[in-house]
Image (cartoon, grey):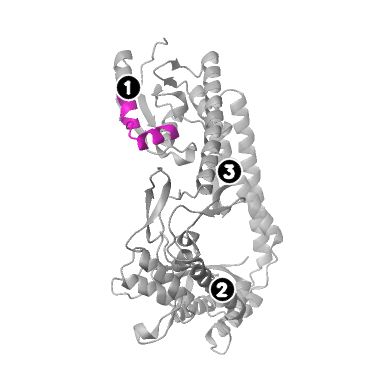
Amino acid sequence: MLELPVGRYVMYLRKSRADEERERNGEFETLGKHERELSAMCRRMAVPVEMPPLRELVSGESIAARPRFQELMEMVQARELAGVVVHAVDRLGRGDMMEYGYILSAFQFTRTLIVTPGKVYDPADPIDLQQLQLQMFFANTEMTGIKRRMREGKDQAVRDGQFIAAHAPLGYDKVRDARGMKTLAPNEWAAWARRAFEWTADPATSMSEISRRLKAAGVPGQWDPQRVKVLIRNPAYKGMVSWNVRVTKIKGRDGMTIEKCHAKGDEPILADGLHPAIVDDELWDAANRRLKAGESHAKRSAPLRNPLAGILRCAKCGRAMVYAKSDPRRTGRCYEYVRHPLNRACTCPPAPLSLLVGLVSESLESAALECEVAAESGEDPAKALETEREGVESAIAKASAKVERLVELYVSGGMDAPEYVERRRDMDARIAEMRARLDELAQERPEPPEAVAMRLKDIMRALRDDDVPPSDKNALLRAMVERIDYANDADGRGNPQVAITIHMRR
């Protein structure tokens, strides 16, 4: 066995998908069992593990989904460790080739050992490195097969009528039937779910009224019109099960960061469920026809009421603020305001629409004044644009020279691969940003400041004129304004403390 060098060692513990399944069946608690086994091995082999173990409580194969593993790799790349103690090599990672190639390269160039109960691997040794490569390759192949079998198993379970979603809809509890099949059983809220369908089928009852009734009754959930629509569209209430309607797909990748998005499934499944229906087909269809009719009517006939629509966004999360109107039956008066979308992790207090329109108008007036001052001083925007373009080109040339020196340093052996990859990635990103800005500058045709001032004044006058339709105000704003960031640090008494930042189109 390889003699262990002196230095810091850390224990890394992570579950696998198979471990999670065994835990659900009550066999054992994975991390605790592995920690006991590895601790005994370290005492037997005199491995000096002094740091607390890094426990990963997720089974994700992607590095981006494993924060403790990211901490581990930072220590490896900083050459802080002599070795890492794991239950098996595949616990480090068995993602795609890019990820396990990155892991092996980091261990190889930092000469960090991998200590397992079966063997101590030195990634700097060609034979050990080959064994590690083969193990990770086969582990990745096994993981791909497991994921495929799991997907096929879930699809078949839904076709058999089982309910396999993570959460039961309102009015149901997740249970297993006599055969052990996953299904649903109605609970005490089932009557309220049926009432929601009955109210929706009635054209005289609005979605807002339905959400208020559910809130008043204490029905679990954060109720608003959109949440009610989600409930009504769920086929589970008529005894059906669905799957693959909305799926997570890979949108792109930048190094170890994987960008995912939600999209419509290519092969959605809709089947008769094993659970009893809360509403019959006739009531379900009537409620959903009401939703479709309301949506199509709104698209055809509803005039734009918010001049800031699509422009005003939350300064924290970037989501578009939405228009709302108070109910005089509840507040005693009717007024327009904007609010953050409901049921979001980020929240922002609402503010009167008139206040925001006034602030935008004042900001545009100040911008128009600045343009007039610039015109009087004889400032040439074309010259300023050319100066910025020359500055960006000079910065790109300097950054490219740094990249060439970085390559020379790596080729000569003065830098290891992980450090080169990290620094090269940062430099390439900066150069790409500068080239993108250069492309933007090439497309810009600066207007004289006096012309810009006149356009800003036209928008300002339109915003202050009650006879101008909100749709026309919105069109004028969109022509010059890219977005308006909105923040509101309201005090505890509900007094708005609004701040806006206007981003003009270039």
Front position among marks 1 and 2? 2
Q: Which residue type does callout 2 highlight? A: Glu
Position of residue 83 in the picture relative to residue 361 (left or right): left
Q: CA distance from mark 3 to mark 1?
A: 37 Å
Q: Which residue type does callout 1 highlight? A: Glu
Picture quarter containing residue 246?
Answer: bottom right
302 is higher (above) or lower (below) than 243: below
Residue identifier under label 1: 37
- Marks 3 and 1 in Cβ contact (< 8 Å): no
Q: Residue at x 42, y 11 (%)?
A: 2
Q: Earlier in the sequence, mark 2 or mark 3?
A: 3
Judging from the image, what secondary structure is the residue with disc 3 in?
A: strand
Judging from the image, what secondary structure is the residue with disc 2 in?
A: helix
Residue identifier under label 2: 295
Note whether residue 395 is visible.
Answer: no
Q: Residue at x 37, y 61 (%)?
A: 171
Confirm whether the magenta stretch covers residue 192.
no
Front position among marks 2 and 3? 2
84 is higher (above) or lower (below) than 381: above
> Which segment did they paint magenta?
17-38
- Marks 1 and 2 in Cβ contact (< 8 Å): no
Q: Quadrant of the C terminus?
A: bottom right
Observer-nearest of 128 and 215: 215
Position of residue 148 in the picture relative to residue 349 (left or right): right
Q: Earlier in the sequence, mark 3 or mark 1?
A: 1
Residue identifier under label 3: 253
Picture quarter containing residue 453?
Answer: bottom right
Q: Position of residue 267 (x, y in %)?
A: 61, 50
Q: Residue at x 51, y 17 (%)?
A: 124
Q: Residues within 10 Å of mark 1 (few under 14, many from 20)?
A: few
215 is higher (above) or lower (below) than 39: below
- Marks 2 and 3 in Cβ contact (< 8 Å): no
